[in-house]
Image: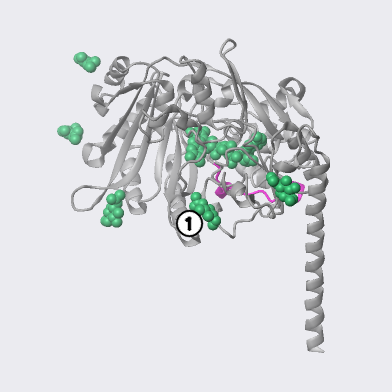
Amino acid sequence: MMRSTTFSLFSIILLLSISWNANSESVHESFLQCLLSHSHPDNPISNAIFTPQNLSYSTVLQSYIRNLRFNTTSTPKPLLILTAKHESHVQAAIICGRKHALQMKIRSGGHDYEGISYVSNVPFFILDMFELRSVDVDIESESAWVQTGAILGEVYYRIAEKSKSHGFPAGVCPTVGVGGHFSGGGYGNMMRKYGLSVDNIIDAKMVDVNGRLLDRKSMGEDLFWAIKGGGGASFGVVIAYKISLVHVPEIVTIFRVERTLEQNATTIVDHWQHIADKLPEDLFIRLIVDVVNTTQNGEKTVRATFIAFFLGGSERLLSIMNESFPELGLAQSDCIETSWLQSIFFWTDLSIDTPTDVLLDRTPALVYLKRKSDYVKEPIPKEGLERIWKRMIELERPTMIFNPYGGKMAEIPSTETPFPHRAGNLWKIQYKADWNEAGTEAANHYIDLTRKLYNFMTPFVSKNPRQAFLNYRDLDLGINHNSDLKASYLEGRVYGIKYFKGNFNRLVKIKTKVDPENFFRNEQSIPLFPY
Ligand SMILES: Cc1cc2nc3c(=O)[nH]c(=O)nc-3n(C[C@H](O)[C@H](O)[C@H](O)COP(=O)(O)OP(=O)(O)OC[C@H]3O[C@@H](n4cnc5c(N)ncnc54)[C@H](O)[C@@H]3O)c2cc1C
Ligand SMILES: *[C@@H]1O[C@H](CO)[C@@H](O)[C@H](O)[C@H]1NC(C)=O
Ligand SMILES: *[C@@H]1O[C@H](CO)[C@@H](O)[C@H](O)[C@H]1NC(C)=O
Ligand SMILES: *[C@@H]1O[C@H](CO)[C@@H](O)[C@H](O)[C@H]1NC(C)=O
Ligand SMILES: *[C@@H]1O[C@H](CO)[C@@H](O)[C@H](O)[C@H]1NC(C)=O
Ligand SMILES: *[C@@H]1O[C@H](CO)[C@@H](O)[C@H](O)[C@H]1NC(C)=O
C-alpha cells in the first residue's frame, strides 16, 4: 500500500514533469516558428537566431556578459538569443514573445550591474541589439542618430572623426552600451556643463508593445519623456536616439592627484566637499576614496584620488584651482593638456596616446562586481569623515567614488526628465567592489562588505527616500515579482521612489497606458497602476 502510494505520487510527478517539458518544448518550438514566419526575404531572420543547439550560442551569450557573477554554469540561460539585424526582427521578437507569453530581456552593451539584461528566473529569451549600432553624425545640424547597440566609444570616435570641436556628454567607460546608458540617464565628466545624456536627446525611434515603429512625434511627449531616464526596458525597445552634440574646446586639461591620510587627505576632502559643486561648470573633479597599504610597516591608510576634467587649458585651470581649491596644491606638472577624445583614455587608466580606434574595441577587462549608490545633500563633518575612514580600513575592499553635481545639473528642473536628482544634491556616491575569485562564497563576502559600508553611510546621505541612480542597478533596493497587480505596484514603489522620486507616479501612468499587459517587465521595471 505504502509502496504503491509512493509509486503513484512519483509517477504523477514524473508525468507532470514530462508534460511540462513537452509543453515548454513545444512553446519554444512554436515561438521559433513564429519568429521564422515573420522573416522577410530582404532581411531573413534565421541567421539572427541562436538556440542552445547552435554551436555559437554560448559565445554569443557570453560576449556581452559584463559581470562575471553571471557567467557561471548555474546562471539561468535564455531559450534563445535573437541578434536583431533589422527593425523587423525587433518587431517579430515583441509580437512572438507576447503571443507565447515569454519574458524578453533586451540587451545593448550588457553593462547592467545586476545582469538583468541577460538573466531571469523565469523562462526567457534575449533580444540582443549589438548588430544595430550605426552612428550617423551630421555636423551641420550638430546632431547624430545613434543606434542603441552602439557603445559610447563608437559614439565618441564617430563624432571626433567629423569634428574636433564637438563632443557628447555621456559615461567615461567606452564599452558601455547606448541602449541602457541613455535610457537610464547617462552621466559623465561634462555633466556639470551640459547635464546628462538624456538632457541632450532630441528624438528617438522605438518599437512599442504592438510592434509599431514610433518616433518622437508618433510616440508623443509622455513616452518620449519616459525613455529619457525611466529605463527603456519598461516601455519598449529603443532602436535609436537622436542626440544634440555639444561644443568642446580643442584642448582640454586633465589631472590626477593622490593624497593619503598622512598627506592631509581629510582636510583636503573636507575642502572638496565645500567647493566641488560650486566650481565653474567647465571643471569636474571626481574623488575616489580607497584603502591602500602604506609603504612603511604594511599598515593600511585611506587614499583620496582627485581626478579632473576641464574644458580649457591648464593656465586657466591653475588659476581656478588656486582661487577655489588651493588645499590640493595642484601644480602645472600635474596637468595634462590633450584633446577631448584622447582624454577618454585617461579615465579608463590607459595612456592618453592610445590609438583612438581602441575606442571601437567592445570588450573590457572583466571582473566580478557589486555596485550601490547614494546622494549626499550636506558636507559630512570632519569627524564623520574620520569615522568613515576607520570603517573603510576595517572593510578594506569596497571603495567610494564621489561625483560632484551642481552647475547645469542644478539648473534643470527635477521633473524635466525621469532622472530626479538635480538641485540640492552635492554629489553622488558609487560604492564599488571588484574581485577576481570565482564562486558564491567570495561573492557573498564582497557583496556583504559593500552593504556594510552602505549601511555605515546611512547618517550622511539622503533620506526619505534614500535616493539611488537607476544606471547603478542595485537589486538590494527591491525586486518586482510582476505577479498580482497590487503587490507588483507596491514592490515597484519601493525601488521606484528611490530611483525616480516624484517622477515615479508619472512613469507608472505612462507605463499603464502604453503597456497595459506588462509585457516589458523585469526585476525592477515600472509597475502598472493597480487601482
Ligand atoms: C564599467 C562600467 C562603467 C560605467 N560607467 C558609467 C558612467 O560613467 N556613467 C553612467 O551613467 N553609467 C555608467 N555605468 C552604468 C551604465 O550606464 C549602465 O549599466 C547602463 O544601463 C549600461 O547600458 P548597457 O546598454 O551597456 O546595458 P544593458 O545591460 O544592455 O542594459 C541595461 C538595461 O537597459 C535595458 N536596455 C538595454 N538596451 C535597451 C534598448 N535598446 N531598449 C530598451 N531597453 C534597453 C536592459 O534591458 C537593461 O534593463 C557603467 C557601467 C559599467 C559596467
Ligand atoms: C541555428 O541553427 C538553426 C537550425 O540548424 C539554423 O536554421 C540557424 O540559421 C542557426 N543560426 C545561425 C545564427 O546560424
Ligand atoms: C565565462 O564562462 C565560460 C564558460 O565557463 C568561460 O569559458 C569563459 O572564459 C568565462 N569568461 C570569462 C571572461 O571569464
Ligand atoms: C599637512 O598639514 C599641516 C598643517 O596644516 C602642514 O604643516 C603639513 O605640511 C601638511 N602635510 C602635507 C604632506 O601636505
Ligand atoms: C597589502 O598588504 C597585505 C598584507 O598586509 C597584502 O596581502 C596585500 O597584497 C597588499 N596589497 C597591495 C595592493 O599591495
Ligand atoms: C594664487 O593666488 C594668490 C593670492 O590669492 C596669488 O598671490 C598667487 O599669485 C596665485 N598663484 C597662481 C599660480 O595663480
Taking the spot 55% from the left edge, 49% from the top edge, the residue there is 476
The 10 Å Cα crowd at callout 1, few under 14, some 14 to 19, many 20 or more, is: many
Q: Nearer the viewer, residue 75 or 317?
A: 75
- Residue placed furthest toward the bottom: 1
In this rendering, position of residue 315 left or right of residue 432: left
Taking the spot 41% from the left edge, 38% from the top edge, the residue there is 401
User: SS at mark 1?
Assistant: helix
Which of the 4 image quarters holds residue 281?
top left
Q: Nearer the viewer, residue 525 or 32?
A: 32
Query: Picture coordinates of residue 508 (x, y %)?
Result: 71, 36
Taking the spot 76% from the left edge, 50% from the top edge, the residue there is 484
- Residue placed furthest toward the top: 140
Q: Which residue is mark 1?
A: 443
Part of the protein shown in magenta: 473-487
Query: Picture coordinates of residue 479 (x, y %)?
Result: 63, 49
Which of the 4 image quarters holds residue 221?
top right
Taking the spot 35% from the left edge, 51% from the top edge, the residue there is 396
Query: Picture coordinates of residue 191 (x, y %)?
Result: 48, 24
In this rendering, position of residue 104 left or right of residue 394: right
Asked whether residue 293 appears in the rendered view, the answer is yes
In this rendering, position of residue 379 left or right of residue 237: left
Asked whether residue 100 appears in the rendered view, the answer is no
**Placement of the C terminus among the 4 image quadrants:** top right
Q: Nearer the viewer, residue 6 or 394?
A: 6
